[in-house]
Structure formats: structure tokens, C-alpha cells
Image: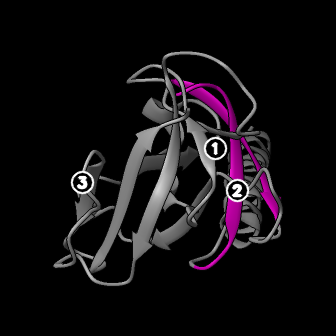
């Protein structure tokens, strides 16, 4: 009887060790596969259930650049959390800060708070499509007249959007 009890306890302990070991390995792999600072991404889906795709930063569709991995984002950045499984049960794999991968002449569809923004062709029509009229590596620069500036004080950047005319 004692042998059966000990055998059962050992079996349960081994099963738990395998389960939690596998879970830890999955989490470590997901952390290693997560985008790194300097990577560029396309985000699709809704912001509450988004998918990301790594692309080269010079790709015409590269909408965002990962500029931070500590979750301490500037108000102009998109806070992007990658989770493994259910957030209540697994926690975060990465807490990223994404800034527009914007260069003068690029156009963006600014989608608001439920969908990610997207880089689009400047021939795209719509009242939410804006053209980057200037992009500076200093948040203290001034935007050209008629454009709206978004100063990222944490990263010392400024992006100026104007109408896509």
C-alpha cells in the first residue's frame, strides 16, 4: 500500500515537473522570438487581438519600429504586449514600445484606438490618411506650417503629419 502511495506521488510530481518545464520552455522560446529593439513590424488585426510580422525597416509597409522593450512608452508610441496563452494564466512575454517607422513622404492611415495604424500608398484616399511632411531626430524641431507634430520626448523624435493631398 505504501509503495502504491509513493508511486502515485512520484508520478504526480513527475507529471507536474514535465508540465511546468514544458511551459517554461515555451515561454523562453516566445521571449527569444519576440521582436527586438530596432526591428520593424506590421501589426494586423485589432489592438486587443493583434498579430505582428517582422519586416525590414526599409520595406514600404513597415509601419512600426520597436523603440523600447521595458513597457515605459512615450504617449506618442503604441504600447504592444506579447503574451503566451491567456494573459491571466501566462503573463507577458514582451512589453514593447512601437513608434511610427516614418520618413518624409510616407503616408499612414491613422486608425484610432482599436486598430493599429498602417503605412499605405500615398495614392490611398480617405480622411484618415496623412502624409509625413517632416521627420526629425530631435523633438525640439518645429513642424512646417499646416502640419501637426507628434513629439516623442522619450526618444527625442518629431513626426509632422499633413493632409494627403
Q: Earlier in the sequence, mark 2 or mark 1?
A: 2
Classify mark 1: helix, strand or loop: loop
Q: Quadrant of the N terminus?
A: top right
Rendering coords of residue 160 (x, y %): 36, 56
53 or 149, which is in the foreground?
Answer: 149
Q: Is residue 89 left or right of residue 152?
A: right
Disc 2/disc 1 C-alpha distance (Å): 19 Å
Classify mark 2: helix, strand or loop: strand
Up the image or down, 165 lies above or below 22; here it is above
Q: Quadrant of residue 97?
A: bottom left
Q: In the image, is residue 128 part of the stretch drawn in magenta? A: no
Mark 2 and mark 1 residues within 8 Å of each other at the beta carbon: no
Q: Which residues are magenta?
A: 38-55
Q: Is residue 96 visible?
A: no
Up the image or down, 40 lies above or below 26; here it is below
Classed neighbour count for the residue bearing mark 3: other residues with Cα under 10 Å, few (<14), some (14–19), many (≥20): few
Disc 1/disc 3 C-alpha distance (Å): 45 Å
Classed neighbour count for the residue bearing mark 1: other residues with Cα under 10 Å, few (<14), some (14–19), many (≥20): some
The circle on residue 84 is 1
127 or 109, which is in the foreground?
Answer: 127
Up the image or down, 156 lies above or below 84; here it is below
30 or 40, which is in the foreground?
Answer: 40
Which of pointers 2 and 1 indicates the residue nearer the eye? Answer: 2
Up the image or down, 124 lies above or below 67; here it is above
Q: Which residue is mark 3?
A: 145
Q: Quadrant of the C terminus?
A: top right
Q: Which residue is mark 2?
A: 41
Amino acid at each position: 500500500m505504501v509503495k502504491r502511495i509513493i508511486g502515485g506521488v512520484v508520478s504526480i510530481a513527475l507529471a507536474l515537473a514535465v508540465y511546468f518545464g514544458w511551459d517554461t520552455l515555451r515561454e523562453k522560446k516566445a521571449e527569444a522570438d519576440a521582436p527586438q529593439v530596432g526591428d520593424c513590424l506590421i501589426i494586423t488585426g485589432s489592438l486587443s487581438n493583434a498579430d505582428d510580422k517582422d519586416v525590414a525597416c526599409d520595406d514600404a509597409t513597415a509601419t512600426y519600429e520597436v523603440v523600447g522593450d521595458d513597457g515605459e512608452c512615450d504617449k506618442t508610441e503604441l504600447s504592444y504586449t506579447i503574451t503566451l496563452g491567456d494573459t491571466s494564466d501566462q503573463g507577458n512575454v514582451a512589453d514593447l514600445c512601437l513608434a511610427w517607422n516614418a520618413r518624409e513622404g510616407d503616408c499612414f492611415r491613422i486608425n484610432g484606438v482599436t486598430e493599429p495604424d498602417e503605412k499605405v500608398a500615398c495614392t490611398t484616399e480617405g480622411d484618415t490618411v496623412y502624409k509625413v511632411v517632416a521627420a526629425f531626430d530631435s523633438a525640439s524641431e518645429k513642424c512646417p506650417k499646416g502640419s501637426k507634430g507628434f513629439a516623442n520626448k522619450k526618444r527625442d523624435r518629431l513626426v509632422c503629419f499633413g493632409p494627403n493631398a
